[in-house]
Amino acid sequence: MPVGTQASVKGLTSEQLDEINCPIVLGNTFHLALRPGEETLDQLGGIQKFMSWPRSVLTDSGGFQMVSLLELSKLTEEGVWFQSPMDGKDMLLSPERSIAIQNKIGADIIMALDDVVSSTTTGPRVEEATYRTIRWLDRCWNAHGRKHDQALFGIVQGGLESKLRDVCLEELVKRDLPGYAIGGLAGGEDKKLFWKMVNQCTDKLPKNKPRYCMGVGYPVDLIVCVAIGVDMFDCVYPARTARFGTALTWDGTIKIKSSSMIRDYGPLDRQCCCKVCQQYSRSFLHNNFGRDETATVHLLTYHNIAHISQLMKQLRESIIEGVFPDVVRSLILQHFQKESIPEWICDALAAVQIPLKPS
Amino acid sequence: MDQDTETNARTGLFSFYKSSYKVECKTPHCLLVTCRGSLPHVTNDLLSELPSLCLELDTCDFLYFNSNSKLKGSQVLKEFGSGIQEYCQLQPHPLYLSFISQQELEKVTYSAKRQQLKCYQRGSCITFSESEYLDLVHTADCHMAECPCVTSYDDCSSDSSRTIRDYSEQSTVLQSNFIKQWRFVSSFHFHDRNNVHDSSHHSSFDHSIAIGVVQGGMDIEQRKQHAKTISQLTGIGGFYIDALQSRIKLVEQQRLAHISISQLPTSSPRVMNGSTSLEQVIGLVACGIDCFISSYPYTLSIHGYALDLPHKNNLWNIQYRKDKNPLSLHCSCPVCRQYSRAYLNHLLNVHEMLAMTLLMVHNTTQYMEFFHQLQRAIETKTFLSFQKQFLANRRVNYS
């Protein structure tokens, strides 16, 4: 899922997103509630109509902004008090409020409000957050007014403590929700702990419900997480890195601003079948890239999202064809041609019977 | 060509042949200013519904491809193996290579002793020789290319007639040398093309049109003289009337255009800058100008305006917050087919890049529609009443 924080995926039109075969985009409840406001969105026929997007939308709960805008917020059992960045007024984001807003925004999948702590936090705060997340989930479910057409996903919290994760998993599974998210990760924690937590969650979550790992990630992270049983992801990375001039390729990343691009007349990625790679040379993209002009940023964003989309498609097809382990192995090896494969990737894949080196 | 009976306005047809395809553009027409090879903030796929859109490319953007002035654009294009249209992926749009930069140009000077041109722009200076420019024109292979000249935009109105004469004379020499070289290259390539082994080479250079630059400052006699001299050079296919861009009043611009045009052959296209306003364009069309180099849609877009002919609406305005209407009810562009004013108002408010992209596509489409209206008015011999009505409608909007 590419991220369209404010009802727009950075610089791309909905037609372009459709061309890339993006099935769903993510919107941020917190930002959308500030501007244009959920009332406006409701009056204009919901977010899909507003952004002229024919496919699906998922909205987060606004909980993540607790971490990212911590200094502006105060946490109570009732909810989170924010100081509005618009007018400085205090506003409360409670589980009920979050769901009411998301009901109005009108996405297909909505998220329960969770008590998010940074993934590097330890101690009693994590425990408090885990239990509060469960209590808030029940309040969210009770407040949910569109159960028939909006799927509410619960979020597994518990930091990096496997006991707490187990508690949270057990409580959430009991409630038999439409889908489950793995939260509180991808925030700069050690990758060795990250994959173990994800693995623990996927082991215990029901097999017939979608699993969504929040805030992941880099292409290799996606490959590993798919291997350990995750179905959905969201990340700003492909679009954000494009704005800094980085293109994703099957052989790793390239920097379009590098002077080695000036006389390189090949496409960004020879294996890529996106429109940008069919048409534009690296040389042109290098010369067109600049502060005052965003056409190349759009082209790189288009390519990067198309790249991720092709990667996921390839993984899906390989599962159906029964060649998933081989495809994972070759993708990882191709990605790490110039550097050694990080240990956590070898460990994670070994845990799901995809050894990278023949034993 | 169709000439209006009440004014000097005229309409005609440009046919551009390039390898296997042909693009036709009716005049009056616009040549939209690009930035380093793309319409600002717009990827070419979004322009697919505007095939007859003409684009202006800036010499300064392509002379050198790196900051230390060592790698020539012409060399990159040679290595790339095809013209600038393919390099920038701007097919099928006809391209106009302008020598006089449309982007904050201060002046262009020439030193005969060193045979060097210096182009001062945005506080920096690019130095190059005449042959380097010729190389660029040759490898870029645009549909139209301006001849090199000198010019100055530092407070032109106060230039003495002596200074203007010096400038004009230098420009004449530069243009006359350039056009001789151009013809040499063209005929050289004509022979090249007959060589079976080299059939992949640029084959259409001799289809490019050389645009002479007509100057003369504010001085009537010098303007007449310069226009006459340039129009007598063999091989010039059109004229750019350098009338000091937007820094003088519209009435004064029209006067200068009249003077220059009086000396130019009627059969050749005349080009001028038309970035200021729709009023400016209408006034100059009435003088007999055919093509307008313009960044008007860009200027509108960066200020949040959407054209709704004959008016323009500022979408920052809070009145559009819940407006479900398209940007213009009479526009069929992809933006109007899909998005509402409310969405654009939101995108502007949250500073999303998509706002500029969508506004550019819409404003470009509406701007082209404005030129279609001009063409139709001239064809149906109703230009003068169209002009009066248009200007009256515009005034209503502001009162």
Image: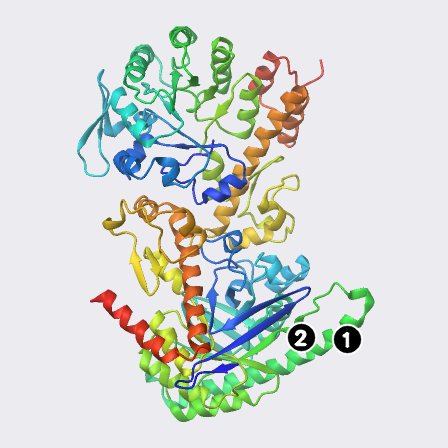
Letter of the chain that mark 2 sits on in the rendering: B
Measured as percent of width and height from the top left, residue A359 is found at 71, 13
In the depicted structure, whether residue A234 falls above or below residue A131: below
Q: Is residue B308 left or right of residue B195?
A: left
Q: Which residue is mark 2?
A: B206
Label drawn at residue B145: none
User: Residue at 58% of width from left, 77% of height from top?
Assistant: B210
Q: Which quadrant holds residue A63?
A: top left
Q: In the depicted view, which residue is nearer to us: B52 or B72?
A: B52
Measured as percent of width and height from the top left, residue A122 is found at 35, 14
**Which label's residue is closer to the chain start, 1 or 2?**
1
In the depicted structure, whether residue A187 falls above or below residue B219: above
In the depicted structure, whether residue B156 falls above or below residue A220: below
Letter of the chain that mark 1 sits on in the rendering: B
User: Residue at 64% of width from left, 83% of height from top?
Assistant: B180
Q: Is residue A80 left or right of residue B27?
A: left
Q: Is residue A262 visible?
A: yes
**Cα gap from disc 1 to disc 2, whole angstroms:** 11 Å
Measured as percent of width and height from the top left, residue B298 is found at 40, 60
Disc 1 marks a residue whose amino acid type is: His
Same chain check for tags 1 and 2: yes
Q: Which quadrant holds residue A92?
A: top left
* Secondary element at image label 1: helix
Q: Which residue is mark 1?
A: B191
